[in-house]
Image (cartoon, helix red, strand yellow):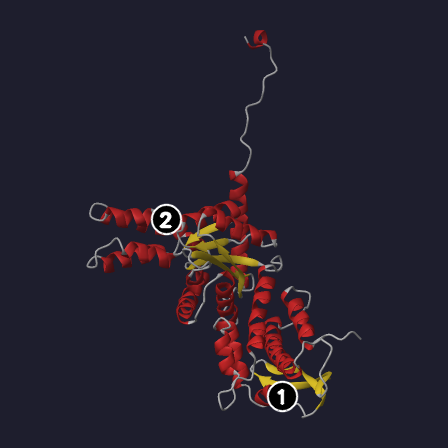
């Protein structure tokens, strides 16, 4: 059997899972276990390399320095269940080799759990990970090289995530949001776009994360086209903020889909145009309009707001009427779904957390570093996302909405009827 480092075997299993080549019932839990296993094995390989003074395949060992002698299986308990890992064995040393890292990990999962949190939620700060793997005297149990290798693994995981097949996601609702980050040193902040969805079974899933020059039409279209190339089906509804570039890209890339304007963003826009003493009443009327029982009732309530405030607050009324149909698109969907599909709030808090971390983590700029940080926060949070319940009756409602959307699309794109050509001569016509 060809000698292959344990880390390479674990990394291949992780890659197969990310690419869908490995079918596992609880794939997300297995992803966490494999990632934790890779963390331990990378650390142990780095410790063995430091002890031997050479890489895995290198020859020419000095007398008494020892040589690699296979692996021994270790096991550690974690929140995801027992995790088995391979420990490098070293033989023929003047002094027997004892792994300090294994002593730390064995029977104690606090360090492992803390490291997993750092890896997925804090952007793989080398200094933080070194601090986690320190002994009681504050000495680091990991070399700087080993830590750097561990942190770079997430980039490969992100690349696998960003290239995976999306045709197996039965998408019902699609949400798109972005955050401006400093992807290139000395350059203005650029947009990082994120897409997540609610699937046919009600589960929420992170679908894509990618940089764009800004929230312009070209960047957003490429973001959507990349997902379409990877098999993303047409959702029933796409939810976004009011950025013109995103709106135009949605309408071009998803012609068989309804569009919802994020109402949290819209309400903030309205609040900026209404005096503070008038805002409570205006807000209550706007909320009643956006949360009406049906689109028809929402239009009536919108007319009432216009009649009441058009003379005194023309800019607020204009803001209300801007993209009005997209603001009430969610009213066509099942009542129990409306609260979840009328905003892009799911990632707002996570983006705030990520922004605070980039302020305190040194050198947290650059496309790779920022993408790793955002991906780390989102993929960890996605484990805890709560889905929505979709009953059989609501499934029928959604199928009826799909039929309506398809009929409207067919009607809009039907070739114009042409008048029949007459074959009579001018004499015959007279």
| Numbered disc 2: secondary structure | helix
Residue at left 58%, top 20%?
A: 421
Nearer to the camera, 309 or 393: 309
In the shown orientation, is residue 344 left or right of residue 397?
Answer: left
Q: Is residue 24 visible?
A: no
Give the x, y percent position of residue 195.
50, 59
Residue at left 61%, top 87%?
A: 102
Label 1 to label 2, Cα distance in Å? 65 Å
Q: Is residue 239 visible?
A: yes
Give the x, y percent position of residue 145.
57, 75
Q: Residue beneath label 1, please? A: 99
Residue 75 lies in what quarter of the image? Answer: bottom right
Q: Quadrant of the C terminus?
A: top right
| 326 in relation to 74, above or below | above
Circle on res. 324? 2
Q: How many C-alpha atoms fall within 10 Å of the one at disc 2: few (<14), some, or many (≥20)? A: some
Nearer to the camera, 211 or 325: 211
């Amino acid at each position: 059997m060809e000698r292959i480092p344990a880390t390479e075997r674990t990394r291949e299993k992780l890659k197969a899972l990310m690419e869908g080549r490995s079918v596992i019932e609880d794939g997300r839990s297995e992803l966490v276990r494999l990632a934790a296993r890779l963390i331990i094995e990378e650390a142990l390989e780095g410790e063995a390399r430091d002890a031997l003074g050479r890489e895995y395949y290198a020859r020419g060992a000095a007398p008494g320095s020892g040589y690699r002698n296979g692996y021994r299986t270790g096991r550690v308990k974690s929140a995801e269940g027992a995790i088995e890992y391979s420990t490098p064995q070293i033989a023929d040393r003047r002094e027997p080799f004892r792994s300090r890292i294994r002593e730390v990990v064995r029977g104690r999962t606090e360090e492992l759990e803390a490291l997993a949190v750092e890896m997925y939620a804090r952007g793989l700060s080398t200094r933080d990970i070194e601090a986690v793997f320190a002994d009681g005297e504050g000495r680091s149990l990991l070399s700087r090289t080993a830590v750097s290798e561990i942190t770079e693994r997430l980039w490969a995981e992100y690349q696998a995530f960003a290239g995976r097949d999306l045709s197996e996601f039965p998408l019902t609702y699609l949400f798109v949001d972005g955050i401006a980050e400093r992807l290139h040193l000395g350059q203005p902040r650029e947009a990082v776009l994120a897409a997540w969805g609610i699937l046919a079974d009600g589960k929420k899933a992170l679908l894509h994360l990618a940089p764009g020059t800004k929230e312009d039409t070209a960047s957003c279209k490429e973001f959507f086209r990349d997902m379409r190339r990877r098999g993303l089906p047409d959702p029933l509804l796409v939810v976004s903020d009011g950025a013109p570039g995103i709106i135009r890209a949605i309408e071009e890339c998803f012609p068989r889909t309804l569009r919802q304007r994020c109402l949290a963003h819209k309400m903030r826009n309205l609040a900026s145009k209404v005096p503070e003493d008038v805002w409570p009443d205006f807000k209550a009327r706007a909320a009643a309009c956006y949360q009406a029982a049906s689109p028809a009732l929402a239009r009536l309530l919108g007319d009432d707001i216009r009649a009441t405030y058009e003379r005194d607050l023309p800019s607020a009324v204009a803001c209300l009427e801007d993209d009005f149909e997209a603001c009430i698109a969610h009213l066509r969907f099942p009542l129990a779904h409306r609260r979840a599909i009328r905003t892009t709030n799911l990632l707002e808090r996570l983006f705030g957390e990520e922004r605070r971390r980039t302020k305190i983590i040194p050198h947290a700029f650059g496309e790779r570093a920022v993408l790793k940080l955002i991906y780390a926060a989102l993929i960890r949070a996605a484990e805890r996302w709560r889905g929505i319940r979709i009953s059989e009756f609501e499934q029928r409602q959604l199928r009826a909405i799909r039929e309506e959307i398809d009929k409207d699309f067919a009607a809009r794109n039907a070739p114009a009827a042409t008048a029949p050509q007459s074959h009579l001569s001018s004499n015959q016509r007279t």
